[in-house]
Each structure stands twice: as structure tokens, then as C-alpha cells.
Image (cartoon, grey):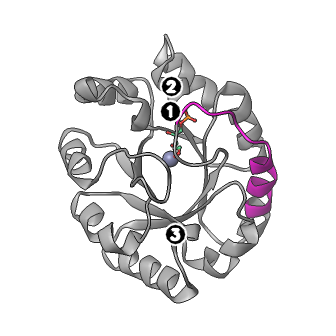
Amino acid sequence: MVKVAPSVLSADFAELKKDLDSIKNCGADWIHYDVMDGHFVPNISFGYSILNDISQVTDLYLDVHLMIENPMKYVDEFIKAHASSITAHIEAFSNEQDIRAFIQHVHHHGVNVGLSIKPATPVDTLIPYLDDLDLVLVMSVEPGFGGQKFQEQAISKIEQLDQLRQERSYLIEVDGGINATTGMLCRQAGADVLVAGSYVFQAENRKEAIESLK
Ligand code: DX5
Ligand code: ZN
């Protein structure tokens, strides 16, 4: 069954514990944690100290999505803050050696590792790393903001990653503009994890919203 990862970017930070409990009780599998630095994306969100606080009050899997330049500079802080997985953007690295170093470093600390691609980045760029990844994150919107419209080209990327998977074991996660309709398309294409921000947090009935994605 597909996993649902509500994005806390859409939570109410003055009521964060309440929102975390609510999504857990409504059937969330993971917490998706969007880190933005105002450079890699034109928005700023939150960093590792809030992740550490969250880790003290929930037992849900903490799925960290780094939308930052120079991921290696901050990765240790997210490891210390109890990330369950750390996903960086392939576009944030300048060479293959740095990507390999990032993957190895995160694995060395016993944390799952992922790479993400923006809408304009082809799946082919990920091929050299697929054997070593726990997770591949397909962006179905331009990273930076919640509440955007799903971009259909993500579907063929998910299908391509599903075909490339064969004997590999990475999970395919999709992020941006997910609702019951687009979520179904992603599931059919082979996605394992659906990130949903506004669709879950703005729903009148969060349990129904999460169930509609599964
Ligand atoms: C966008 C973030 C997403 C965002 C998704 O840059 O990576 O995780 O929170 O929000 P929705 O589900 O509202 O598109
Ligand atoms: Zn995200």
C-alpha cells in the first residue's frame, strides 16, 4: 500500500504538536519536512532545530526534503536532529563525486538517503546513483511553495523510474499538487510515497483526505 507523507510546510506552526497528532491519528505514514534556504528556491522555511523538536514529540518517520544549496554543509545537523531519511536535489551538486560523497556520508550514519529532481531535470541524470538510493523524489511542481498545480510530466518520470527499478529497491516518492485525482495517477504509475501539503492540512476531514490517497 502507498504511504502518505503530509508536508508540515502547510501545518500551523503555532499549533504544531496538535497538527502532528492530528495527521498521525488520521493515518499519515510519514512526516515530510521541507527545508528551504532562500537560495536554491525563492522561499525560506525552517531548519534542523525545529526538526529536532518534532522528533521529540512524534514517532512518525521523518522524511527530510532539502531544497538548499550545498547540502553537505548542513547534512550532519539533520542527522543529529533525527531525520529518518534525507533527500537532496541533484541540481544542488556541482559534480558526481560530491553526490557520491553525500550518499555515502548519510548511509554511514544509518540514515536513508534520497535524490530529488525538479520538473525540468530528466530521470536519466539519476541513473548512475540508483543502485545506492533508498528513495527517489520526483517533483511534480517547481520546488519552493505549497499549493501549486500538479505538472503531468511527473507521471512519465514515475513510470520510467518504476521500469528502471527491476532488481533495485528504492522507493518512488512524488511531491507537489497531490490530491485524490493526481494521487491516483501517481499510484498507477508506480509511486510508493505521496507527499501532500495543502490537500491534507486544508481538508475539512483530514482522515478522509489521507484515505483518498491510499
Ligand atoms: C514544495 C514542497 C512540497 C509542498 C507540497 O516545494 O517540496 O513538499 O509542501 O505542497 P502541496 O501538496 O500543497 O503541493
Ligand atoms: Zn517537499
Magenta stretch in the rendered image: 146-161
Please provide percent x and percent y for residue 183.
68, 34
Amino acid residing under circle 2? Val
188 horizontally vs 133: left or right? right
66 horizontally vs 46: left or right? right
Circle 2 sits on which residue?
200
Mark 2 vs ligand 1: CB below 8 Å: yes
Q: Circles 3 and 2: CB distance less than 8 Å?
A: no
Work out whether mark 1 precedes mark 3 in sequence or the reverse, and give the earlier one: 3
Work out whether mark 3 precedes mark 2 in sequence or the reverse, and give the earlier one: 3
Question: From the viewer's perspective, is residue 55 above or below residue 146?
Answer: below
Mark 1: few/some/many CA within 10 Å (<14, 14-19, 20+): many
Image quarter for residue 24? top left
Determine the secondary structure under disc 3.
helix
Amino acid residing under circle 1? Gly
Asked if residue 14 is among those painted magenta in the image, a careful observer would answer no
Circle 3 sits on which residue?
92
Mark 1 vs ligand 1: CB below 8 Å: yes
Front residue of 41 and 72 = 41
Query: Which residue appears at 43% of the width and 23% of the height?
Result: 26
Question: From the viewer's perspective, is residue 27 above or below residue 51?
Answer: above
- The C terminus lies in quadrant: top right
Does residue 1 appear in the picture of this structure? no
Image quarter for residue 122? bottom right
Query: Which residue appears at 52% of the width and 69% of the height?
Result: 92
